[in-house]
């Protein structure tokens, strides 16, 4: 019995020498060959029952994507990014906070909650998997990612992807043909989570960091960033993901709604909203956007 237990431990955690003396670990299928895998993996602190608590109304009969989103799809998608630091950076507290932050964005972007909704407005994340009433085609002629005839580039996924060039960029990053088949993001929950995680882990525009680097403290603000009131933390993730649609406009409802989802998820994860930090770190009300948008360049 002792030998069997030892074998299982050896199977789950394999240590090899890494570059520059860094320890490299592998933990099963979830996290492979990375220094980040030496930390806890996401399933160590975030399990099915917690996912169900965070998104308790997603399979309600009135939810538009009932039966689509599930914990397994989230974890399967995360296996591609945990070795890169998603949910595996820092100690357990930072790891739990990052998963809560990412899902806070996801929950607010896909919610159909409203003030008097059963369970409260924050219980309705993952209600949608695509924009219900597109106002335009979201096709902007782009020499790198030209629009495919017949394809529609309205918002889809866990962090809604809009516009042909964003489908092209993310699809290229995932090695998935999203430019020609944007509908894939509303047909496969694992792919939808993968697209959201790719966007969280990678800058979508030049001269700006990723939301991940901003949140976990990898990003170091320049003097210009400091003057623009951009600080490491949750508030600047909104700046990265949404720019001036959400940030630099004072205490507007869209910004506060995203913050509320993040705080709600911290509570449900057992971390507690007090760990979210002061309002100037949480919010982006006074931040100057990294890249001011135009009517044809919004990413969300």
Image (tube, grey):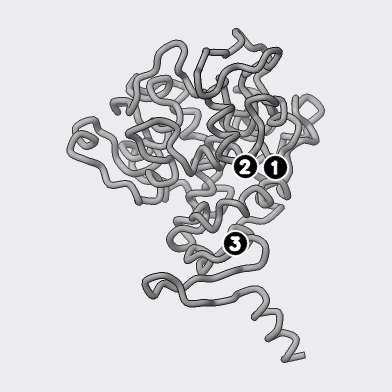
Q: Are marks 1 and 2 in contact (CB under 8 Å)?
A: yes
**Badge 1 element:** helix
Residue that badge 2 annotates: 194
Q: Are marks 1 and 3 in contact (CB under 8 Å)?
A: no
Question: What's the residue at 74%, 36% (across, down)?
Answer: 188
Question: What's the residue at 41%, 70% (across, down)?
Answer: 19
Q: Could you say which disc has been placed on residue 190 in the image? A: 1
Could you tell me residue 36's position as x and y percent?
A: 49, 63
Q: Is residue 115 left or right of residue 71?
A: left
Q: Camera-side residue: 19 or 287? A: 19
Furthest-bottom residue in this view = 2
Sequence-wise, which precedes: disc 2 or disc 3? 3
Residue that badge 3 annotates: 31
- Say few, some or many: other residues with alpha carbon within 10 Å of mark 3 (under 14 / 14 to 19 / 20 or more): many
**Badge 3 element:** strand
Rendered image quadrant of residue 224: top left
The answer to whether residue 124 is above or below residue 85 is: above
**Badge 2 element:** helix
């Amino acid at each position: 019995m002792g030998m069997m237990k030892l074998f299982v431990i050896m199977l789950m955690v394999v240590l090899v020498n890494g570059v520059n003396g860094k320890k490299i670990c592998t933990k099963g299928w979830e996290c492979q060959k990375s220094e980040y895998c030496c930390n806890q993996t996401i399933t160590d602190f975030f399990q099915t029952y917690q996912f169900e608590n965070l998104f308790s109304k997603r399979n309600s009969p009135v939810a538009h994507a009932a039966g689509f989103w599930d914990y397994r799809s989230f974890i399967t998608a995360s296996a591609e990014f945990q070795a890169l630091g998603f949910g595996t950076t820092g100690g357990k507290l930072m790891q739990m906070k990052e998963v809560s932050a990412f899902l806070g964005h996801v929950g607010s972007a896909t919610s159909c909650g409203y003030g008097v909704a059963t369970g409260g407005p924050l219980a309705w994340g993952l209600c949608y998997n695509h924009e219900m009433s597109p106002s335009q085609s979201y096709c902007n002629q782009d020499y790198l990612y030209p629009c495919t005839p017949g394809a529609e580039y309205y918002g889809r996924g866990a962090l809604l992807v809009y516009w042909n060039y964003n489908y092209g960029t993310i699809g290229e990053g995932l090695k998935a043909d999203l430019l020609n088949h944007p509908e894939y993001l509303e047909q496969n929950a694992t792919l939808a989570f993968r697209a959201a995680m790719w966007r969280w882990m990678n800058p979508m525009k030049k001269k700006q960091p990723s939301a991940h680097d901003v949140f976990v403290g990898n990003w170091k603000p320049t003097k210009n960033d400091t003057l623009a009131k951009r600080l490491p933390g949750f508030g600047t993730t909104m700046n990265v993901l949404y720019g001036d649609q959400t940030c630099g406009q004072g205490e507007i409802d869209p910004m506060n709604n995203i913050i509320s989802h993040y705080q709600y998820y911290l509570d449900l994860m057992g971390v507690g909203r007090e760990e979210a930090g002061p309002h100037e770190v949480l919010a982006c009300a006074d931040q100057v956007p990294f890249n001011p948008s135009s009517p044809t360049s919004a990413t969300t």
